[in-house]
Image (spheres, rainbow, N blue to C red):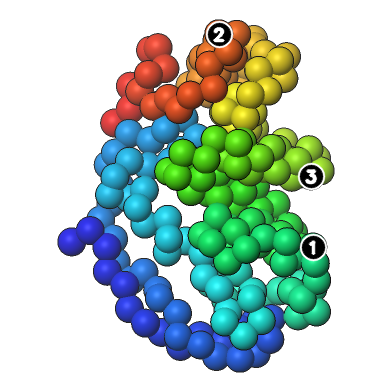
């Protein structure tokens, strides 16, 4: 099956206008081995284009345009919001901004990461690194909330390493215990890669002693 989509008319939560949007209705269970930043393998990694929708009337970008907002539509007309273009990566960066405004900080961080994945696929290394740095900026800005989620904290180790911030990975993750043996082993592996100056993509099953089912 792969994935099934259909067109649905959705009302934008920001401006109130309706538009046709592509909605995923069915997809196969993902059984692939993910990257260390949790990006799935094919065919699921190609579904990324369905992870962000845009209202054609006001430019609101989110997983779905009917998700309620904590800001006015005037924000969507601001230079801050519109400094990003309407490419897939640009839409994810806009999604990150509205998620941060909506106070769903983990989703804002992940939206920046998804933008990085888009640039990875285009072999745009510096643009991908910039998106990862933006993700870490969100993490640092809302650390009191995000540090409570160990999965997010560990994810940030890979984001930092992939953006070239090896010193911080070593400083914050080498010898760190997460209360979980699995997470601690992955953190140690991230620190080991950072000590080698390795900013490449690695699969979860490359972590010594970790079996991915």
The mark that comes first in sequence, 3 or 1, is 1
Q: Can residue 110 be seen in this view?
A: no
Instruction: Please state the horizontal and vertical placement of residue 127, each as a whole percent of the image.
Output: 60, 42
**Label 1 vs label 2: CA separation?**
37 Å
Is residue 93 at all visible to an observer of this figure? Answer: yes
Percent x, y for residue 12? 60, 83
Q: Are marks 3 and 2 in contact (CB under 8 Å)?
A: no
Quarter residue 141 falls in: top right
Mark 3 = which residue?
Answer: 142
* Disc 1 secondary structure class: loop
Badge number at residue 196: 2
> Tag 2, which secondary structure?
loop
Separation (CA) of disc 3 from disc 2: 29 Å
Left or right? Give the position of 164 relative to 120. right
The quarter of the picture where residue 143 lies is top right
State the quadrant of the C terminus: top left
Query: Label 1 belongs to which residue?
Result: 80
Residue 74 vs residue 101, the one in the foreground: 74
Q: Which of marks 3 and 2 is in front?
A: 2
């Amino acid at each position: 099956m792969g994935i099934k989509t259909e067109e649905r008319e959705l009302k934008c939560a920001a401006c109130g206008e309706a538009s046709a949007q592509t909605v995923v209705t069915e997809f196969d269970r993902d059984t692939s081995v993910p990257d260390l930043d949790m990006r799935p393998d094919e065919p699921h990694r190609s579904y990324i284009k369905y992870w962000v929708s845009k209202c054609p009337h006001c430019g609101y970008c989110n997983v779905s345009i009917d998700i309620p907002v904590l800001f006015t539509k005037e924000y969507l007309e601001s230079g801050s919001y519109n400094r990003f273009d309407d490419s897939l990566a640009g839409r994810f960066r806009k999604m990150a901004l509205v998620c941060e405004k909506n106070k769903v900080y983990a989703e804002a961080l992940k939206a920046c990461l998804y933008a990085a994945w888009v640039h990875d696929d285009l072999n745009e290394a510096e643009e991908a690194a910039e998106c990862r740095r933006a993700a870490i900026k969100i993490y640092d800005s809302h650390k009191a909330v995000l540090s409570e989620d160990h999965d997010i904290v560990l994810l940030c180790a890979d984001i930092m390493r992939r953006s070239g911030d090896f010193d911080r990975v070593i400083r914050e993750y080498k010898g760190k215990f997460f209360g979980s043996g699995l997470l601690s082993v992955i953190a140690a592996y991230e620190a080991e890669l950072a000590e080698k100056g390795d900013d490449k993509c690695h699969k979860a099953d490359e972590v010594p002693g970790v079996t991915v089912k």
